[in-house]
Image: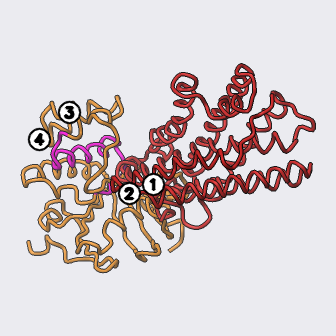
């Protein structure tokens, strides 16, 4: 395959991505596609997402809609595919302070979609439950309107009802052509999102059986 | 202005206060008497040694000897700054950045004083250059070490929030801005306290020393004011240079957070 064909290919393309700790990984998700990675803890799932987001040093090729990550700065690259850890940090006191003023209307709408009540958006971060913080952390990434999302166990602290609400928002993004790579232990989630299922085992990524194959 | 010369007996009488501290420690079970005695012995030996060394260097009238002594003092300060934080840089990185901060902060302020305010002949006269460098290095050490320790501790502790910001495409500089500010502020605290307390709560040591040595109080005060300005400038330079250099070593060309460079 030549570089020209890689450049014209849209979606997320990962080739020979490796670091001292993990890899090499070869991986691709087409536009509007979702990949769900499961596997035991410590197997390297978060490491893989962090390498794609360029938060950990790694060698190899990563392209999003044809653009190689090395052609842009680290922050510009991560704005295209934000990474949300499972327990994301907060750096200011109030929830609302974490959103740019221009993004607050959309953030409030998403918060309502996610089953959060209005007051929680005005609250201090320290007063919120883990599940509330988790949904708000996803909203921080969604309002960036990025062409891709890297989500590390986005619904791990949510009950089924709230997890469904988040999935509905993710499905809407997929329909708009967004690429989503997420880590999840919920086998049903991959099926509901019509995602390609992968398993990480000892820092090696392998394709798992398609969950919808039984249908 | 002849100083009243102290005899060894005079010092021995005052030294009995150390024995009192040690006795207190034994009576109250403070478990501190060894440290009190040991640090007192160290203090005496170090000061006597530096006294004779300074007498020798002053007599030599050699710029090279002055430079060697100042560089050695600066290196000791730089080493202290680099090794004091709980989280430290791997390898020589910490020492390189603390040496840079110490060198620039000390050289800039001491040179300013020698070339404008004090103006001895020649301007590098050992008596002035070494004394000024010594006192400036104390402040440089204090502020640089507070700034570095605060920065490394807070960046390690705030890793999740820094990486949450980086993960959303924020620049490294923006994600660490408040932490750097806090670190530099912390480094400047001692000199700010020292200046606001000077003359009201405490009589600064240098001034007191000069008055005891027979100098007119108002003359001593002028020197003290000059020194405070120098120390304030040196503290600011040291804290800012060391904090920003350390920050630069905690990231890379992709603006990642590189805590793996610490141990």
Picture quarter with the N terminus of chain B: top right
Separation of residues labelled 4 and 3 (CA atoms): 15 Å
Separation of residues labelled 2 and 1 (CA atoms): 6 Å
Separation of residues labelled 2 and 3 (CA atoms): 54 Å
| Chosen colour scheme | by chain
Instruction: Identify the subunit bearing mark 4.
Output: A
Q: Is residue B138 left or right of residue B89?
A: right
Q: Is residue B239 left or right of residue B128?
A: left
Residue A123: mark? 3
Chain with orange colouring: A
Residue B163 visible in the picture: no
- Who's the residue at 31% across and 80% down the image? A202
Give how far across and how far down residue B26 sits, in percent: 38, 57
Which residue is labeled 2 in the image? Answer: B26
Query: For the residue labelled by badge 1, is the local secondary structure a helix, a strand or a loop?
Result: helix
What segment carries the magenta color? A127-151
- Chain B: its colour in the image is red
Query: For the residue labelled by badge 3, is the local secondary structure a helix, a strand or a loop?
Result: loop
Which residue is labeled 4 in the image? Answer: A115
Q: Are marks 2 and 1 in contact (CB under 8 Å)?
A: yes
Q: Are marks 4 and 3 in contact (CB under 8 Å)?
A: no
Residue A93 visible in the picture: yes
Q: Is residue B74 left or right of residue B190?
A: right
């Amino acid at each position: 395959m030549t570089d020209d064909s890689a450049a014209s290919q849209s979606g997320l393309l990962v080739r020979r991505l490796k670091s001292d700790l993990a890899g090499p990984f070869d991986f691709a998700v087409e536009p509007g596609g979702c990949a769900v990675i499961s596997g035991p803890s410590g197997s390297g799932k978060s490491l893989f997402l962090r390498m794609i987001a360029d938060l950990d040093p790694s060698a190899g090729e990563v392209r999003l809609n044809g653009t190689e990550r090395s052609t842009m700065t680290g922050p510009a690259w991560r704005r295209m595919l934000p990474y949300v850890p499972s327990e994301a940090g907060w750096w200011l006191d109030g929830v609302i302070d974490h959103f740019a003023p221009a993004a607050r209307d959309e953030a409030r709408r998403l918060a309502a979609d996610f089953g959060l009540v209005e007051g929680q958006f005005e609250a201090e971060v320290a007063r919120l439950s883990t599940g509330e913080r988790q949904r708000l952390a996803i909203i921080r990434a969604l309002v960036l309107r990025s062409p891709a999302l890297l989500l590390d166990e986005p619904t791990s602290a949510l009950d089924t009802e709230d997890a469904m609400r988040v999935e509905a928002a993710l499905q809407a993004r997929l329909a708009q052509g967004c690429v989503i790579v997420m880590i999840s232990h919920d086998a049903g989630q991959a099926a509901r999102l019509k995602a390609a299922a992968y398993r990480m085992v000892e820092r090696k990524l392998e394709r798992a059986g398609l969950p919808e194959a039984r249908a | 202005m002849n100083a009243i010369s102290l005899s060894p007996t005079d010092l021995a009488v005052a030294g009995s206060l150390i024995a009192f501290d040690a006795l207190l420690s034994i009576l109250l079970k403070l478990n501190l008497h060894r440290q009190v005695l040991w640090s007192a012995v160290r203090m005496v030996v170090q000061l006597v040694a530096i006294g004779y060394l300074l007498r020798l260097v002053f007599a030599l009238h050699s710029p090279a000897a002055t430079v060697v002594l100042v560089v050695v003092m600066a290196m000791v300060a730089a080493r202290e700054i680099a090794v004091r934080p709980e989280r430290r840089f791997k390898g020589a990185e910490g020492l390189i950045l603390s040496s840079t901060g110490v060198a620039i902060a000390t050289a800039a302020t001491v040179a300013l004083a020698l070339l404008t305010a004090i103006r001895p002949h020649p301007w590098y006269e050992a008596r002035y250059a070494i004394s000024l460098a010594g006192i400036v290095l104390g402040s440089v050490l204090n502020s640089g070490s507070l700034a570095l320790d605060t920065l490394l501790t807070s960046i390690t502790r705030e890793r999740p929030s820094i990486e949450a910001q980086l993960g959303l495409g924020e620049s490294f500089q923006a994600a660490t801005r408040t932490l750097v500010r806090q670190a530099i502020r912390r480094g400047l605290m001692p000199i700010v306290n020292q200046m606001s307390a000077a003359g009201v709560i405490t009589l600064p040591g240098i001034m007191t020393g000069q008055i005891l040595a027979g100098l007119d109080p108002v003359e001593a005060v002028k020197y003290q004011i000059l020194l405070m300005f120098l120390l304030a400038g040196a503290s600011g330079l040291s804290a800012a240079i060391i904090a920003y250099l350390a920050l630069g070593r905690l990231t890379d060309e992709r603006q990642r957070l590189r805590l793996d460079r610490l141990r």
